[in-house]
Amino acid sequence: MNTFSLFTPGRVNLIGEHTDYNDGLVLPMAIEKGIVMKVSRRDDRLAVLRSDHQETSITLDLTNELLAGEHHWSCYLQGVIAGFQRLGWEIPGFDCEVSATLPSGGGLSSSAALEVGMATVIETLCERKISLEEKALLCQKAEHEFAGVPCGIMDQFAVTFGKADHALLLDCRDRQIEYVPLDPQVAILVINCGVKHSLADGEYAQRRSQCEQAASELGVSSLRDVSWQRWQQESATLSGVVRQRAQHVLSEHQRTLTFVEALKNQQWQSAGAAMYASHESLRDDYAVSCAELDQLVEISRLIAGVHGCRMTGGGFGGCVVALIDPHHATAIMAAFREQYLQQTGIDAEMFVTRAANGPLVEVIA
Ligand code: GLA
């Protein structure tokens, strides 16, 4: 295949936030918005990467081993190329033009979509594949090493294993996936609050280490090993911020179980209540929300047809996700737009999305 186009979805997480790096449960789904890559094979061993957001292109010599450098939009792609080089793959030269239908900086995993997209480009060019799990893990490693973000496995798994009309209940300890069907009686609305606060990265790493500290004080290797029952009895042995962080992670585990049961039993109110409780926990105990996300959640409480709403992803800006009645989608979006605009002056970008499949390659020539 010499010329092809590839669509890779972004993701939204329904519930199970900041639990992946604690070996916990997450419930993301791939979405209909994502990254498009147009790829043509070259006769030499150069990779020429272009983005419709940038004026200049990046040229890489694939005969050299790529090393992590300064942070740049292409570092996600370079990290993945380096991962395949380490596996000993001879990657042919190619031109790649990247464009996005995802809001950038919206916390919908455009970075995971870039990574998993590039991995699929390389597989297509080389006409061989690695397993989906190896692919997701290679992409996670690229993000750790080339973008310097110590992320968990949720985003790369959600994008790689996306399945139409299903959310993915991923157990981050043993990486087992259960696909949970999304009933057409409910729809998923994503709203970008329009801000991204710059403290995001350092704060993320700090939350991770606070969780590790909580686990070590409780004498376990990860918070997943602490049962809810044990936590009820022993939470007072931890203090201050470390106790609050663990409280979020352990209660979020319970809420994820509740949410999945509610979805399966079409109990939308109970699913919605778990989402609101998740938001409060992320706001108060985990301290990763921000005023704009909180405002959207508060607005949602007064709109008829919204079952639940919460911040989604790493936090400090980005998006909220709401579970809504699809029959009222237009009125719900209008109400969000009007009230948020009135309160903040921001005209929020929003869309209803179905759960999507993972990367899709279309042959052009
Ligand atoms: C970011 C990370 C994920 C996960 C979420 C929070 O999206 O990339 O691994 O930790 O934050 O749930």
Image (spheres, rainbow, N blue to C red):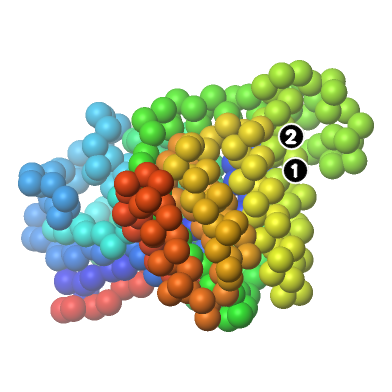
Q: Do the residues labelled 1 and 2 touch (CB within 8 Å)?
A: yes
Dot 1, how many residues are within 10 Å of its Cα: few (below 14), some (14-19), or many (20+)?
some
Residue 341 in the image: state x and y as whole percent: 36, 52
Residue name at image x 57 percent, y 74 percent: 325
From the viewer's side, name the closer residue of 215 and 123.
215
From the viewer's side, name the closer residue of 353 and 268.
268
Hey, which quadrant is residue 61 in on the image? top left
Amino acid type indicated by mark 2: Gln
Can residue 167 be seen here? The reply is no
Q: Is 316 placed left or right of 54 in the picture? A: right
Ligand 1 closer than 8 Å to the CB at disc 2?
no
From the viewer's side, name the closer residue of 122 and 27.
27
Amino acid type indicated by mark 1: Ser
Residue 164 in the image: state x and y as whole percent: 50, 76
Residue name at image x 18 percent, y 64 percent: 39
**Residue that label 2 marks:** 247
Residue 247 in the image: state x and y as whole percent: 74, 34
Hey, which quadrant is residue 166 in on the image? bottom right
Q: Quadrant of the C terminus?
A: bottom left
Can residue 304 be seen here? The reply is yes
Residue 196 - label = none
**Residue that label 1 marks:** 251
Residue name at image x 64 percent, y 42 percent: 280
Q: Distance between the residues labelled 1 and 2?
A: 6 Å
Label 2's element? helix
From the viewer's side, name the closer residue of 294 and 214.
294
Does residue 296 sit above or below 186 in this rendering? above
Q: Is 174 placed left or right of 124 in the picture? A: right
Residue name at image x 39 percent, y 59 percent: 338
Label 1's element? helix
